[in-house]
Amino acid sequence: MTPRPDSDHPADPRADTAANLPVTAGRGDLVVAALLAVVGVVLVVGNLTMDVVGEDGTSVLGPAGFGWLVAALALGTSVAIAARAVRRPAAERAQEAADPTREMNVPAFLGALGGLVGFAVLLQPLGWLLSATGLFFAVSSALGSRPLLRNAAVGFAMACVLQLLFGAALGLALPSGVLGWL
Amino acid sequence: MDQLTALLGGFGDVLTPANVLWIVLGAFLGTAVGVLPGLGSSMAVALLLPLTFALDPLAALIMFSGIYFGGLFGDSTAGILMNTPGNSTAIATTFEGHRMALAGRAPQALATAAIGAFLGGLVATCLVVLAAPTLADLATRFGPGEYFALALFAFVAIAAVVGESAVRGLAALSVGLALAVVGIDQSTGTERYAFGVPALFDGVSIVVITVALLALGEVLHVASRTGRAGARELVPSRGRPWLSRADLRKALPAWLRGAGFGVPFGFIPAGGAEVPTFLAYGTERSLDARREEPEFGTGAIRGVAAPEAAGNATAGSAMGSLLALGLPTSATAALLLATFQQYGLQPGPLLFERSGDLVWALLASLFVALVTLLLLNLPFSPLWAKLLELPQGYLYAGITVFAGLGVYATGASGFDLGLMVALGLVGFVMRRYDLPLAPVLIAVILGPLAEYSLRDALGNSGNDPTTLVSSPISVGLYALLLLGLAVTGWRRRSARRSRTGADAAAPS
């Protein structure tokens, strides 16, 4: 419900022609439809390969019944959203493609995502202090924070404080990693 | 008057130095995340939930309720001073509130908002204290059929009736339900949707889901918008926050009307306080238009008072429906329900019998939290606004590190961390393409209740589907649901008709 400053502007008439419009423009909802399709297909495959053990009283549903209902809901909404995205009028799509609140800073996004993936992979081998510092560095730098050296220093300080607070004081076992060998 | 005795006992449990400290900490954190745009009380609770292993249940729950109320106190500050509401619940307040600030009445606007939030919460919490035992009594008559009706009511209400698009709400619901069915089936022991991964046999951890969707999804979304946001400008708030007698005479009835809108919405799974704040704002505006000197558009105090009271009144009665019925009606309430489950407690009618001390202490803590929040917000709103000068990069990087710590703390497993990143991406996609998050959370939390009560109801009656509509309570719930759907359909249709009518009339 957040008011978008540009939503009242009519789309640029030159962009109105469907010919100049990339096929993907204004069809971001296809990503949503794909996500829902994956959810539905995973449930269907899970149901078909399910190895039902034990007795479920006398209910007709059994362990898979509810899963079928959810799969139907996911696939149904997927089709509905995809159909709407495909049939969208060109003018509406052009307007959304030109909407500045939809622009995406891809390098920054990938930087933050890379930091998260790196943290998930490296936490056990490298240990908390180094991987948390790396995560903080990656996200703050991706968000445009400078200088880079200070980002790393602040990240290291935060990792240390959390290690002392939760590791030493509250007994949470955080992996020590390579620094543990020293 | 048993309630009053019990409540006094609750005050006795809560007013210890340690517990007061947790309330103050919760109020502090709640106000802070409320002030900061993009952060909300649900994210704060999600980040802290895995780290409460060192706390006793009461300490964790009173801190989280402080955060819940605090988020609704803080959200209007940024809206009034900068025209950027801290949360969707403060959009309605922002319209007139920012105009008051531009007219040099920022302190009065902030004071009206803080007192409104206090009064709204107070009215609702008092009603909950009076009504909760009766509600819990009603809920003891619930069997599997009634619980299924309640869960279905919550699902459809949050997905279809309240959101902007029913299809998107249902889509979000299916994502949450899919996450809820993963793991070993409770009644047969069958392995479901785990595809042989032992880490999934216990299901997808609720902490991983909430941290990833609420915190990481937001971080990735903010990253994707780096350098693309507009600049913000702070209107300074100078002077004392005293309301004149004329101001009070206008604000008081508006506060009470706002609270009246908010209370019923806490019992309906409407995803939180957004709808009642807009209803309260709309009512004040149409009342204002009939006055001799309309004030809306120039900074009307009533336009600030009513939505703020409505917002916190919703939070108060949401606590009531959570404690008495086990029904979460907003994202943050759903997380509080997850907190109860972490400690092995199931909210609902039996909670009053089994852990009465805890419930009454929690209710007493709500009053303490409201007073604390009034003291924190009434004099210091302009100071809170300084939080907006925090460097965004460090703020979000800190949230990310905290999220990683929390997920690792619950399971110490690398698999959970990978799952967290994957679900963080799902959260990002949902934000970018306007899929609502609240239905996912409600579905994850109420999904198992819906599934097993449906299976039990069918199993107990020899698969007779009419068992689902065999009691007055379930018939009443379904009737309410159909009524809601009919009203929504009619409202959407007339809205669309008036929009196309306006388009046809426009010269272009």
Image (cartoon, rainbow, N blue to C red):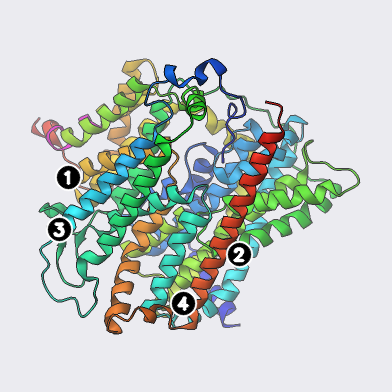
Whole-number angstrom distance, CA of label 4 to CA of label 2: 19 Å
Q: Residue furthest left?
A: A181
| Amino acid bearing label 3 | Leu
Q: Magenta residues, as a range? A: A123-133
Query: What's the distance in space between the residues labelled 4 and 1, CA to CA?
Result: 41 Å
Q: Amino acid at mark 1?
A: Phe
Query: Residue B218 placed where, x, y %?
Result: 40, 37
Separation (CA) of disc 3 from disc 2: 44 Å
For disc 3, the marked residue is A48
Mark identifier at residue B415? 1
- Of badges 3 and 4, the one in the foreground is 3
Q: What is the spatial separation of the Cα atoms under label 1 and label 3, in whole angstroms?
A: 25 Å
Q: Chain of mark 3?
A: A
The residue drawn where x is 63% and y is 62% is B122
Q: CA distance from mark 3 to mark 4?
A: 33 Å
First in sequence: mark 2 vs mark 1: 2
Marks 2 and 1: CB-CB under 8 Å? no
Q: Could you say whether the residue bearing mark 4 is in a helix, strand or loop?
A: helix
Q: Secondary structure at mark 1?
A: helix
Disc 4 and disc 1 on one polypeptide chain:
yes
Q: Which mark is residue B264?
A: 2
Residue B243 point in image, percent of width and height = 79, 45
B247 to the left or right of A161? right
Q: Please say whether residue A131 is one of the residues in the magenta stretch.
A: yes
Residue designated by label 4 = B474
Give, as a three-letter code, the residue at label 4: Ser
